Amino acid sequence: MFSELEKLSNLFIVLAVISGVGSVFSFILLHDYWHLLQTDFKPFFFICGYLSVSLPVIFAALAVTVKKIVREMRIKDNYISERIRKLEAQLDK
């Protein structure tokens, strides 16, 4: 079960990197587009910039969250396994 969650976390990391690279290219295109038009319609550029930044951040946050969940689940699993071993040892006595 933990390996599937780790794969999911790695997938989120890959998606964050891919969307980060896409964000760099979109900022380059937005910058060129801004100079090409010389327009005062700034909300469009701010919205595009916000969306370009927010997507990699969301994927990175999901990756970190899943990694923390996996770590906590492993700690709980180890604790429960150790507790079961102790109880079995007490029952055998």
Image (cartoon, helix red, strand yellow):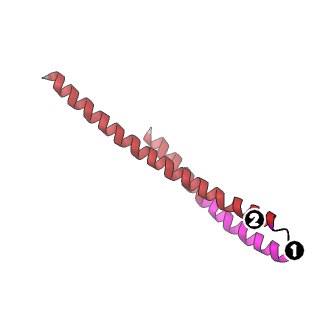
Q: Quadrant of the N terminus?
A: top left
Say whether disc 1 or disc 2 marks the residue closer to the N-terminus. Answer: 1
Compared to residue 25, the image places residue 70 above or below, namely above
Residue 14 lies, with reference to residue 76, above or below; the image says below
Q: For the residue labelled by badge 1, is the local secondary structure a helix, a strand or a loop?
A: helix
Which residue is rendered at x = 45% and y = 43% of the image?
3
Q: Mark 1 points at which residue?
A: 37
| Segment tinted magenta in the rendering | 17-42
Query: What amino acid is at disc 2?
Result: Phe
Left or right of residue 57: residue 10: left
Q: Where is residue 23 in the image (x, y as percent from the top left)?
A: 68, 64
Badge number at residue 46? 2
Looking at the picture, how far across and down is residue 65, in whole percent? 50, 49
How dense is the environment of label 1, judged by Cα within 10 Å: few (below 14), some, or many (20 and up)? few
Q: Residue at x 55, y 50 (%)?
A: 62
Residue 37 lies in the magenta-colored region: yes
Q: Nearer the viewer, residue 5 or 66?
A: 66
Q: Judging from the image, what secondary structure is the residue with disc 2 in?
A: helix
Check disc 1 and give the amino acid type: Leu
